[in-house]
Image (cartoon, rainbow, N blue to C red):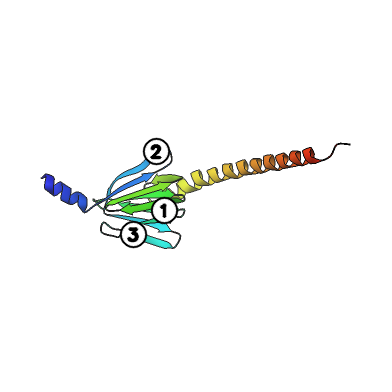
Amino acid sequence: MSQQSDLDRKQLLQVELRLPTRTLFSGTAIKVFAIAANGAFTLLVNHTDFVTALVPSVLIVTDEAGAEHFFAVDEGILVKQDHYVRIAIQRGLQGESLAAINDLVSTHFLAVDDDERVARSALSRLEANIVRRFGDLRKPSL
């Protein structure tokens, strides 16, 4: 029995999808679909080992029962080594379907993008103010 379960595990990918603060998904899969800068690809158990940068897209993990798990991922890195697929992403969300992922991205990622835009604008104003003040320090006093 133990030998059979070890054999079954070798026919599956061990997938781990990590965010900076927690694990979004950890489990076994028969395939992983992802998108890199040079195009989409599907990983199977016996594919060659490699590393690639992921672009913001949908990642699909198909488990051994054939169920698909959908993830909206921001930029990240995917590493396939032996039967392990490790994915590190900055931001990610899990959804029940592609439609659910679309809704999640619209509400979560776009809201974060607006917050980041406001923060970048404030940071730019602070940097400009610092540069102006340093310029004032260099002016000779009369």
Viewport quadrant of the C terminus: top right
Does 54 sit left or right of 123 as displayed? left
Quarter-of-image position of residue 39: bottom left
* Residue at 66% across, 43% down: 124
Q: CA distance from mark 1 to mark 3?
A: 12 Å
Quarter-of-image position of residue 35: bottom left
Residue that badge 2 annotates: 22
Residue furthest to the bottom in view is 38
* Residue at 17% across, 48% down: 6
Residue 42 image label: 3
Viewport quadrant of the N terminus: top left
Residue 58 image label: 1
* Residue type indicated by callout 1: Val
Q: Secondary structure at mark 1?
A: strand
Q: Secondary structure at mark 3?
A: strand
* Residue type indicated by callout 3: Thr
Q: CA distance from mark 3 to mark 2?
A: 25 Å
User: Where does residue 134 sit, x and y in percent of width and height?
Assistant: 74, 39
Residue 41 image label: none
